[in-house]
Image (cartoon, coloured by chain):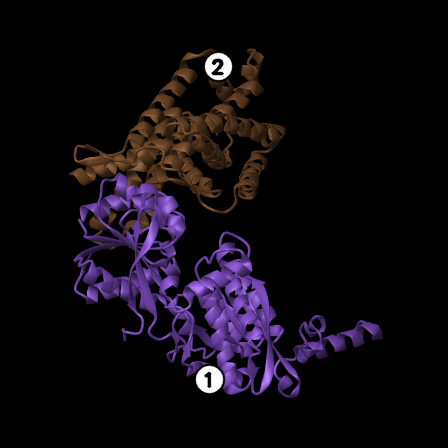
Chain colours: A brown, B purple
Amino acid sequence: MDIFIQQIINGLVLGSIYALVALGYTMVYGILGLINFAHGEVVMIGALTALTAIGLLVPAGLPGPVVVLGGLLIAIPVCMAVGFAIERIAYRPLRNAPRLAPLITAIGVSIVLQQLAMMGWGRNYHTFPPLLPATPHQLFGAAITDLQMLIVVVAAVLMAALVWLVTRTRLGRAMRATAENPAVARLMGVDVDRVISFTFVLGSALAAVAGVMVAANYSIAHYAMGFMLGLKAFTAAVLGGIGNLGGAMLGGLLLGIIESLGAGYIGDLTGGFLGSNYQDVFAFFVLILVLVFRPSGLMGEKVAERA
Amino acid sequence: MTLPVPSRSLSALVALSACLLAACGDKADNAAPATPDAGATSAAMVIRLGHVAPLTGPQAHLGKDNENGARLAVDDLNAEHFMIGGVAAKFELLGEDDQADPRQATTVAQKLADSRVNAVIGHLNSGTTIPASRIYHDAGIVQVSPSATNPQYTRQGYKSAFRVFADDVQQGSVLGAFATGKLGVKRIAIIDDRTAYGQGLADEFEKAAKAAGATVVTREYTTDKATDFAAILTKVKSTSPDLLFYGGMDTQAGPMARQLKTLGVTVPMLFGDGACTVEFHKLAGDGAEGHYCSLPGVPLEKMAGGTAFRDRYKAKFNADIQLYAPYAYDAVRVVAEAMRKAGSTDAVKFLPELSAINYPGLTAEIAFDEKGDIRNAAVTLYQAKSGAWSPLETMGGQAAK
């Protein structure tokens, strides 16, 4: 039983990170109908920027958590700027182009960012210094570290804050209006360009946090880390119903837990026929099953009219 | 051929194809005396050795280290006025870069084959050495790799392929003997990264451990790009093993050791040479302590003349030895020795001498088995102690087999 709880905890930690990244995909999709494939690279830039900043801060002799927070506070504005620039340079000129054009641009931006990061940070793996205590606590017979608890809590708080922002604030209403119908929103006095920019900046800030979480939890970061993470988070967004905030969160957590349980139990379930090498296959199999029965994802009902 | 061909370009074409047939390669840019073995009667015989390793990219530091080792050997040979067949030999080293990329490796190999080098030292990686070995074999060029460990390299039936480093079969069996003997473990969990290296080493380890009576309680898999191991490590934990073996590189082994610690699992881990690096300690942080790894060969301090070699290397290149430089040095020396014994730089003549050689090298007594693998290869085991690998014991070597 403690093993089962441990796998759920593993899944929750992983899923929280997926969910944060998935929110970036889903917000942009909800408003622009665009899949921002460069979003995974923003996560990577967040992780590497934070690592560089932490490398500079460590000699100052501050306590570990302060240094990590400092790295995070530098990574967030950098990612926001990157997200803002991506939208301005690569997507805005193509706002009224056929849908295929921005999709291709998105892939292009992803490749450009990855190569730039490779030139800047090199091809090597960068290590996250052991600044945060890694000693596990016991929770119902399973082990969880302070950092992992922090990841789940921070992710939950950020997601709650985002939901509040979108549903309760004036800016959130403008976002929803733009998602509903940009032309009408503009007639109602919404500065659509500003709202779209803001969406990218917000998603990128979440990506920066996710990037630091990944680097801190797995202790490494490198220029190509964004690709697979982005793909998984995109999958999570689709699983939950792309364009739907709650869907991205649910999809992220579900994907994380499915992966963990898949890796842990797939061997037992199939009598050793399939092993943990089918971890990803298992996750994508669940995705296919969900999409067959609910083509717009678990919670994505409004998507049909937009797509 | 309906188009009229201007006579000038036609004659150029004829000249070009004649050149190709005669394999004139790049002789032009390398002056006249480069003709390899016709020089038996001339005053000084020039012997050209190709050396290939990644000189750019993430493994550039290891590649440069190999090349420096080979260069030191070449310089030593020239300083010693090494004689082959009664004639003073002058060695030249042609350093090439394969970027650790199998495709680039074959391009470079073809280039060396075209320029008719007398022998090739290299490549560094298994993935580049294996495809290149076919080109050298077809061109009749002797190849000695200082560091490729995949067994397949010497098992393709090429008489021209040698290595002066223990292969994964030898390493895997030593790892198995160490785990079941010295560590006395009974229940072993194995993870590999599904690459030719990681999976191959894990398979060899599993065979050796099972033969010694240990039980493999679970076999799990990851990839050489993964960063999250929590799920498979939890699975491993549920099988309560005495030892966890990982076949793969330091980039996964380090984070894996760290995550193992955060899961509160205290089982020791065992790695092959891919994780037996300084980098492992950086990646694993405080999760590194107490784990084990193996590296073919003996520690430099234990080699006869090892410390002297280290000092000379440092003086010459103003750098520290990374890993394989002593093996690259020996690879050059053993080729030169075979040439001296045969009294010829012709591969047809010195190849049998190389196969039968018994040479007291820097790293070991070098003798090859029928496949071209080094006989009695030693493997040293290390344990992580306060941020560094400290040697435990050397197994195999002259005693084994």
On-image quarter of the N terminus of chain A: top left
Spatial CA span between label 1 and label 2: 82 Å
- At horizontal 28% and vertical 41% (from top left) the residue drawn is A260
Rendering quarter of residue B208: bottom left
Compared with B223, A205 (above or below) is: above
- Residue that numbered label 2 is attached to: A171
Compared with A69, B15 (above or below) is: below
Res B165 visible: yes
Q: Amino acid at mark 1?
A: Glu
- What subunit carries mark 2? A
- Mark 1 secondary-structure assignment: helix
Select label 1 or label 2 by which is in front: 1
- At horizontal 56% and vertical 19% (from top left) the residue drawn is A194
Rendering quarter of residue A115: top right
**Spot occupied by residue B341 in the image (x, y as percentages of width and height):** 49, 85
Q: Amino acid at mark 2?
A: Leu
Q: Which mark is residue B353?
A: 1
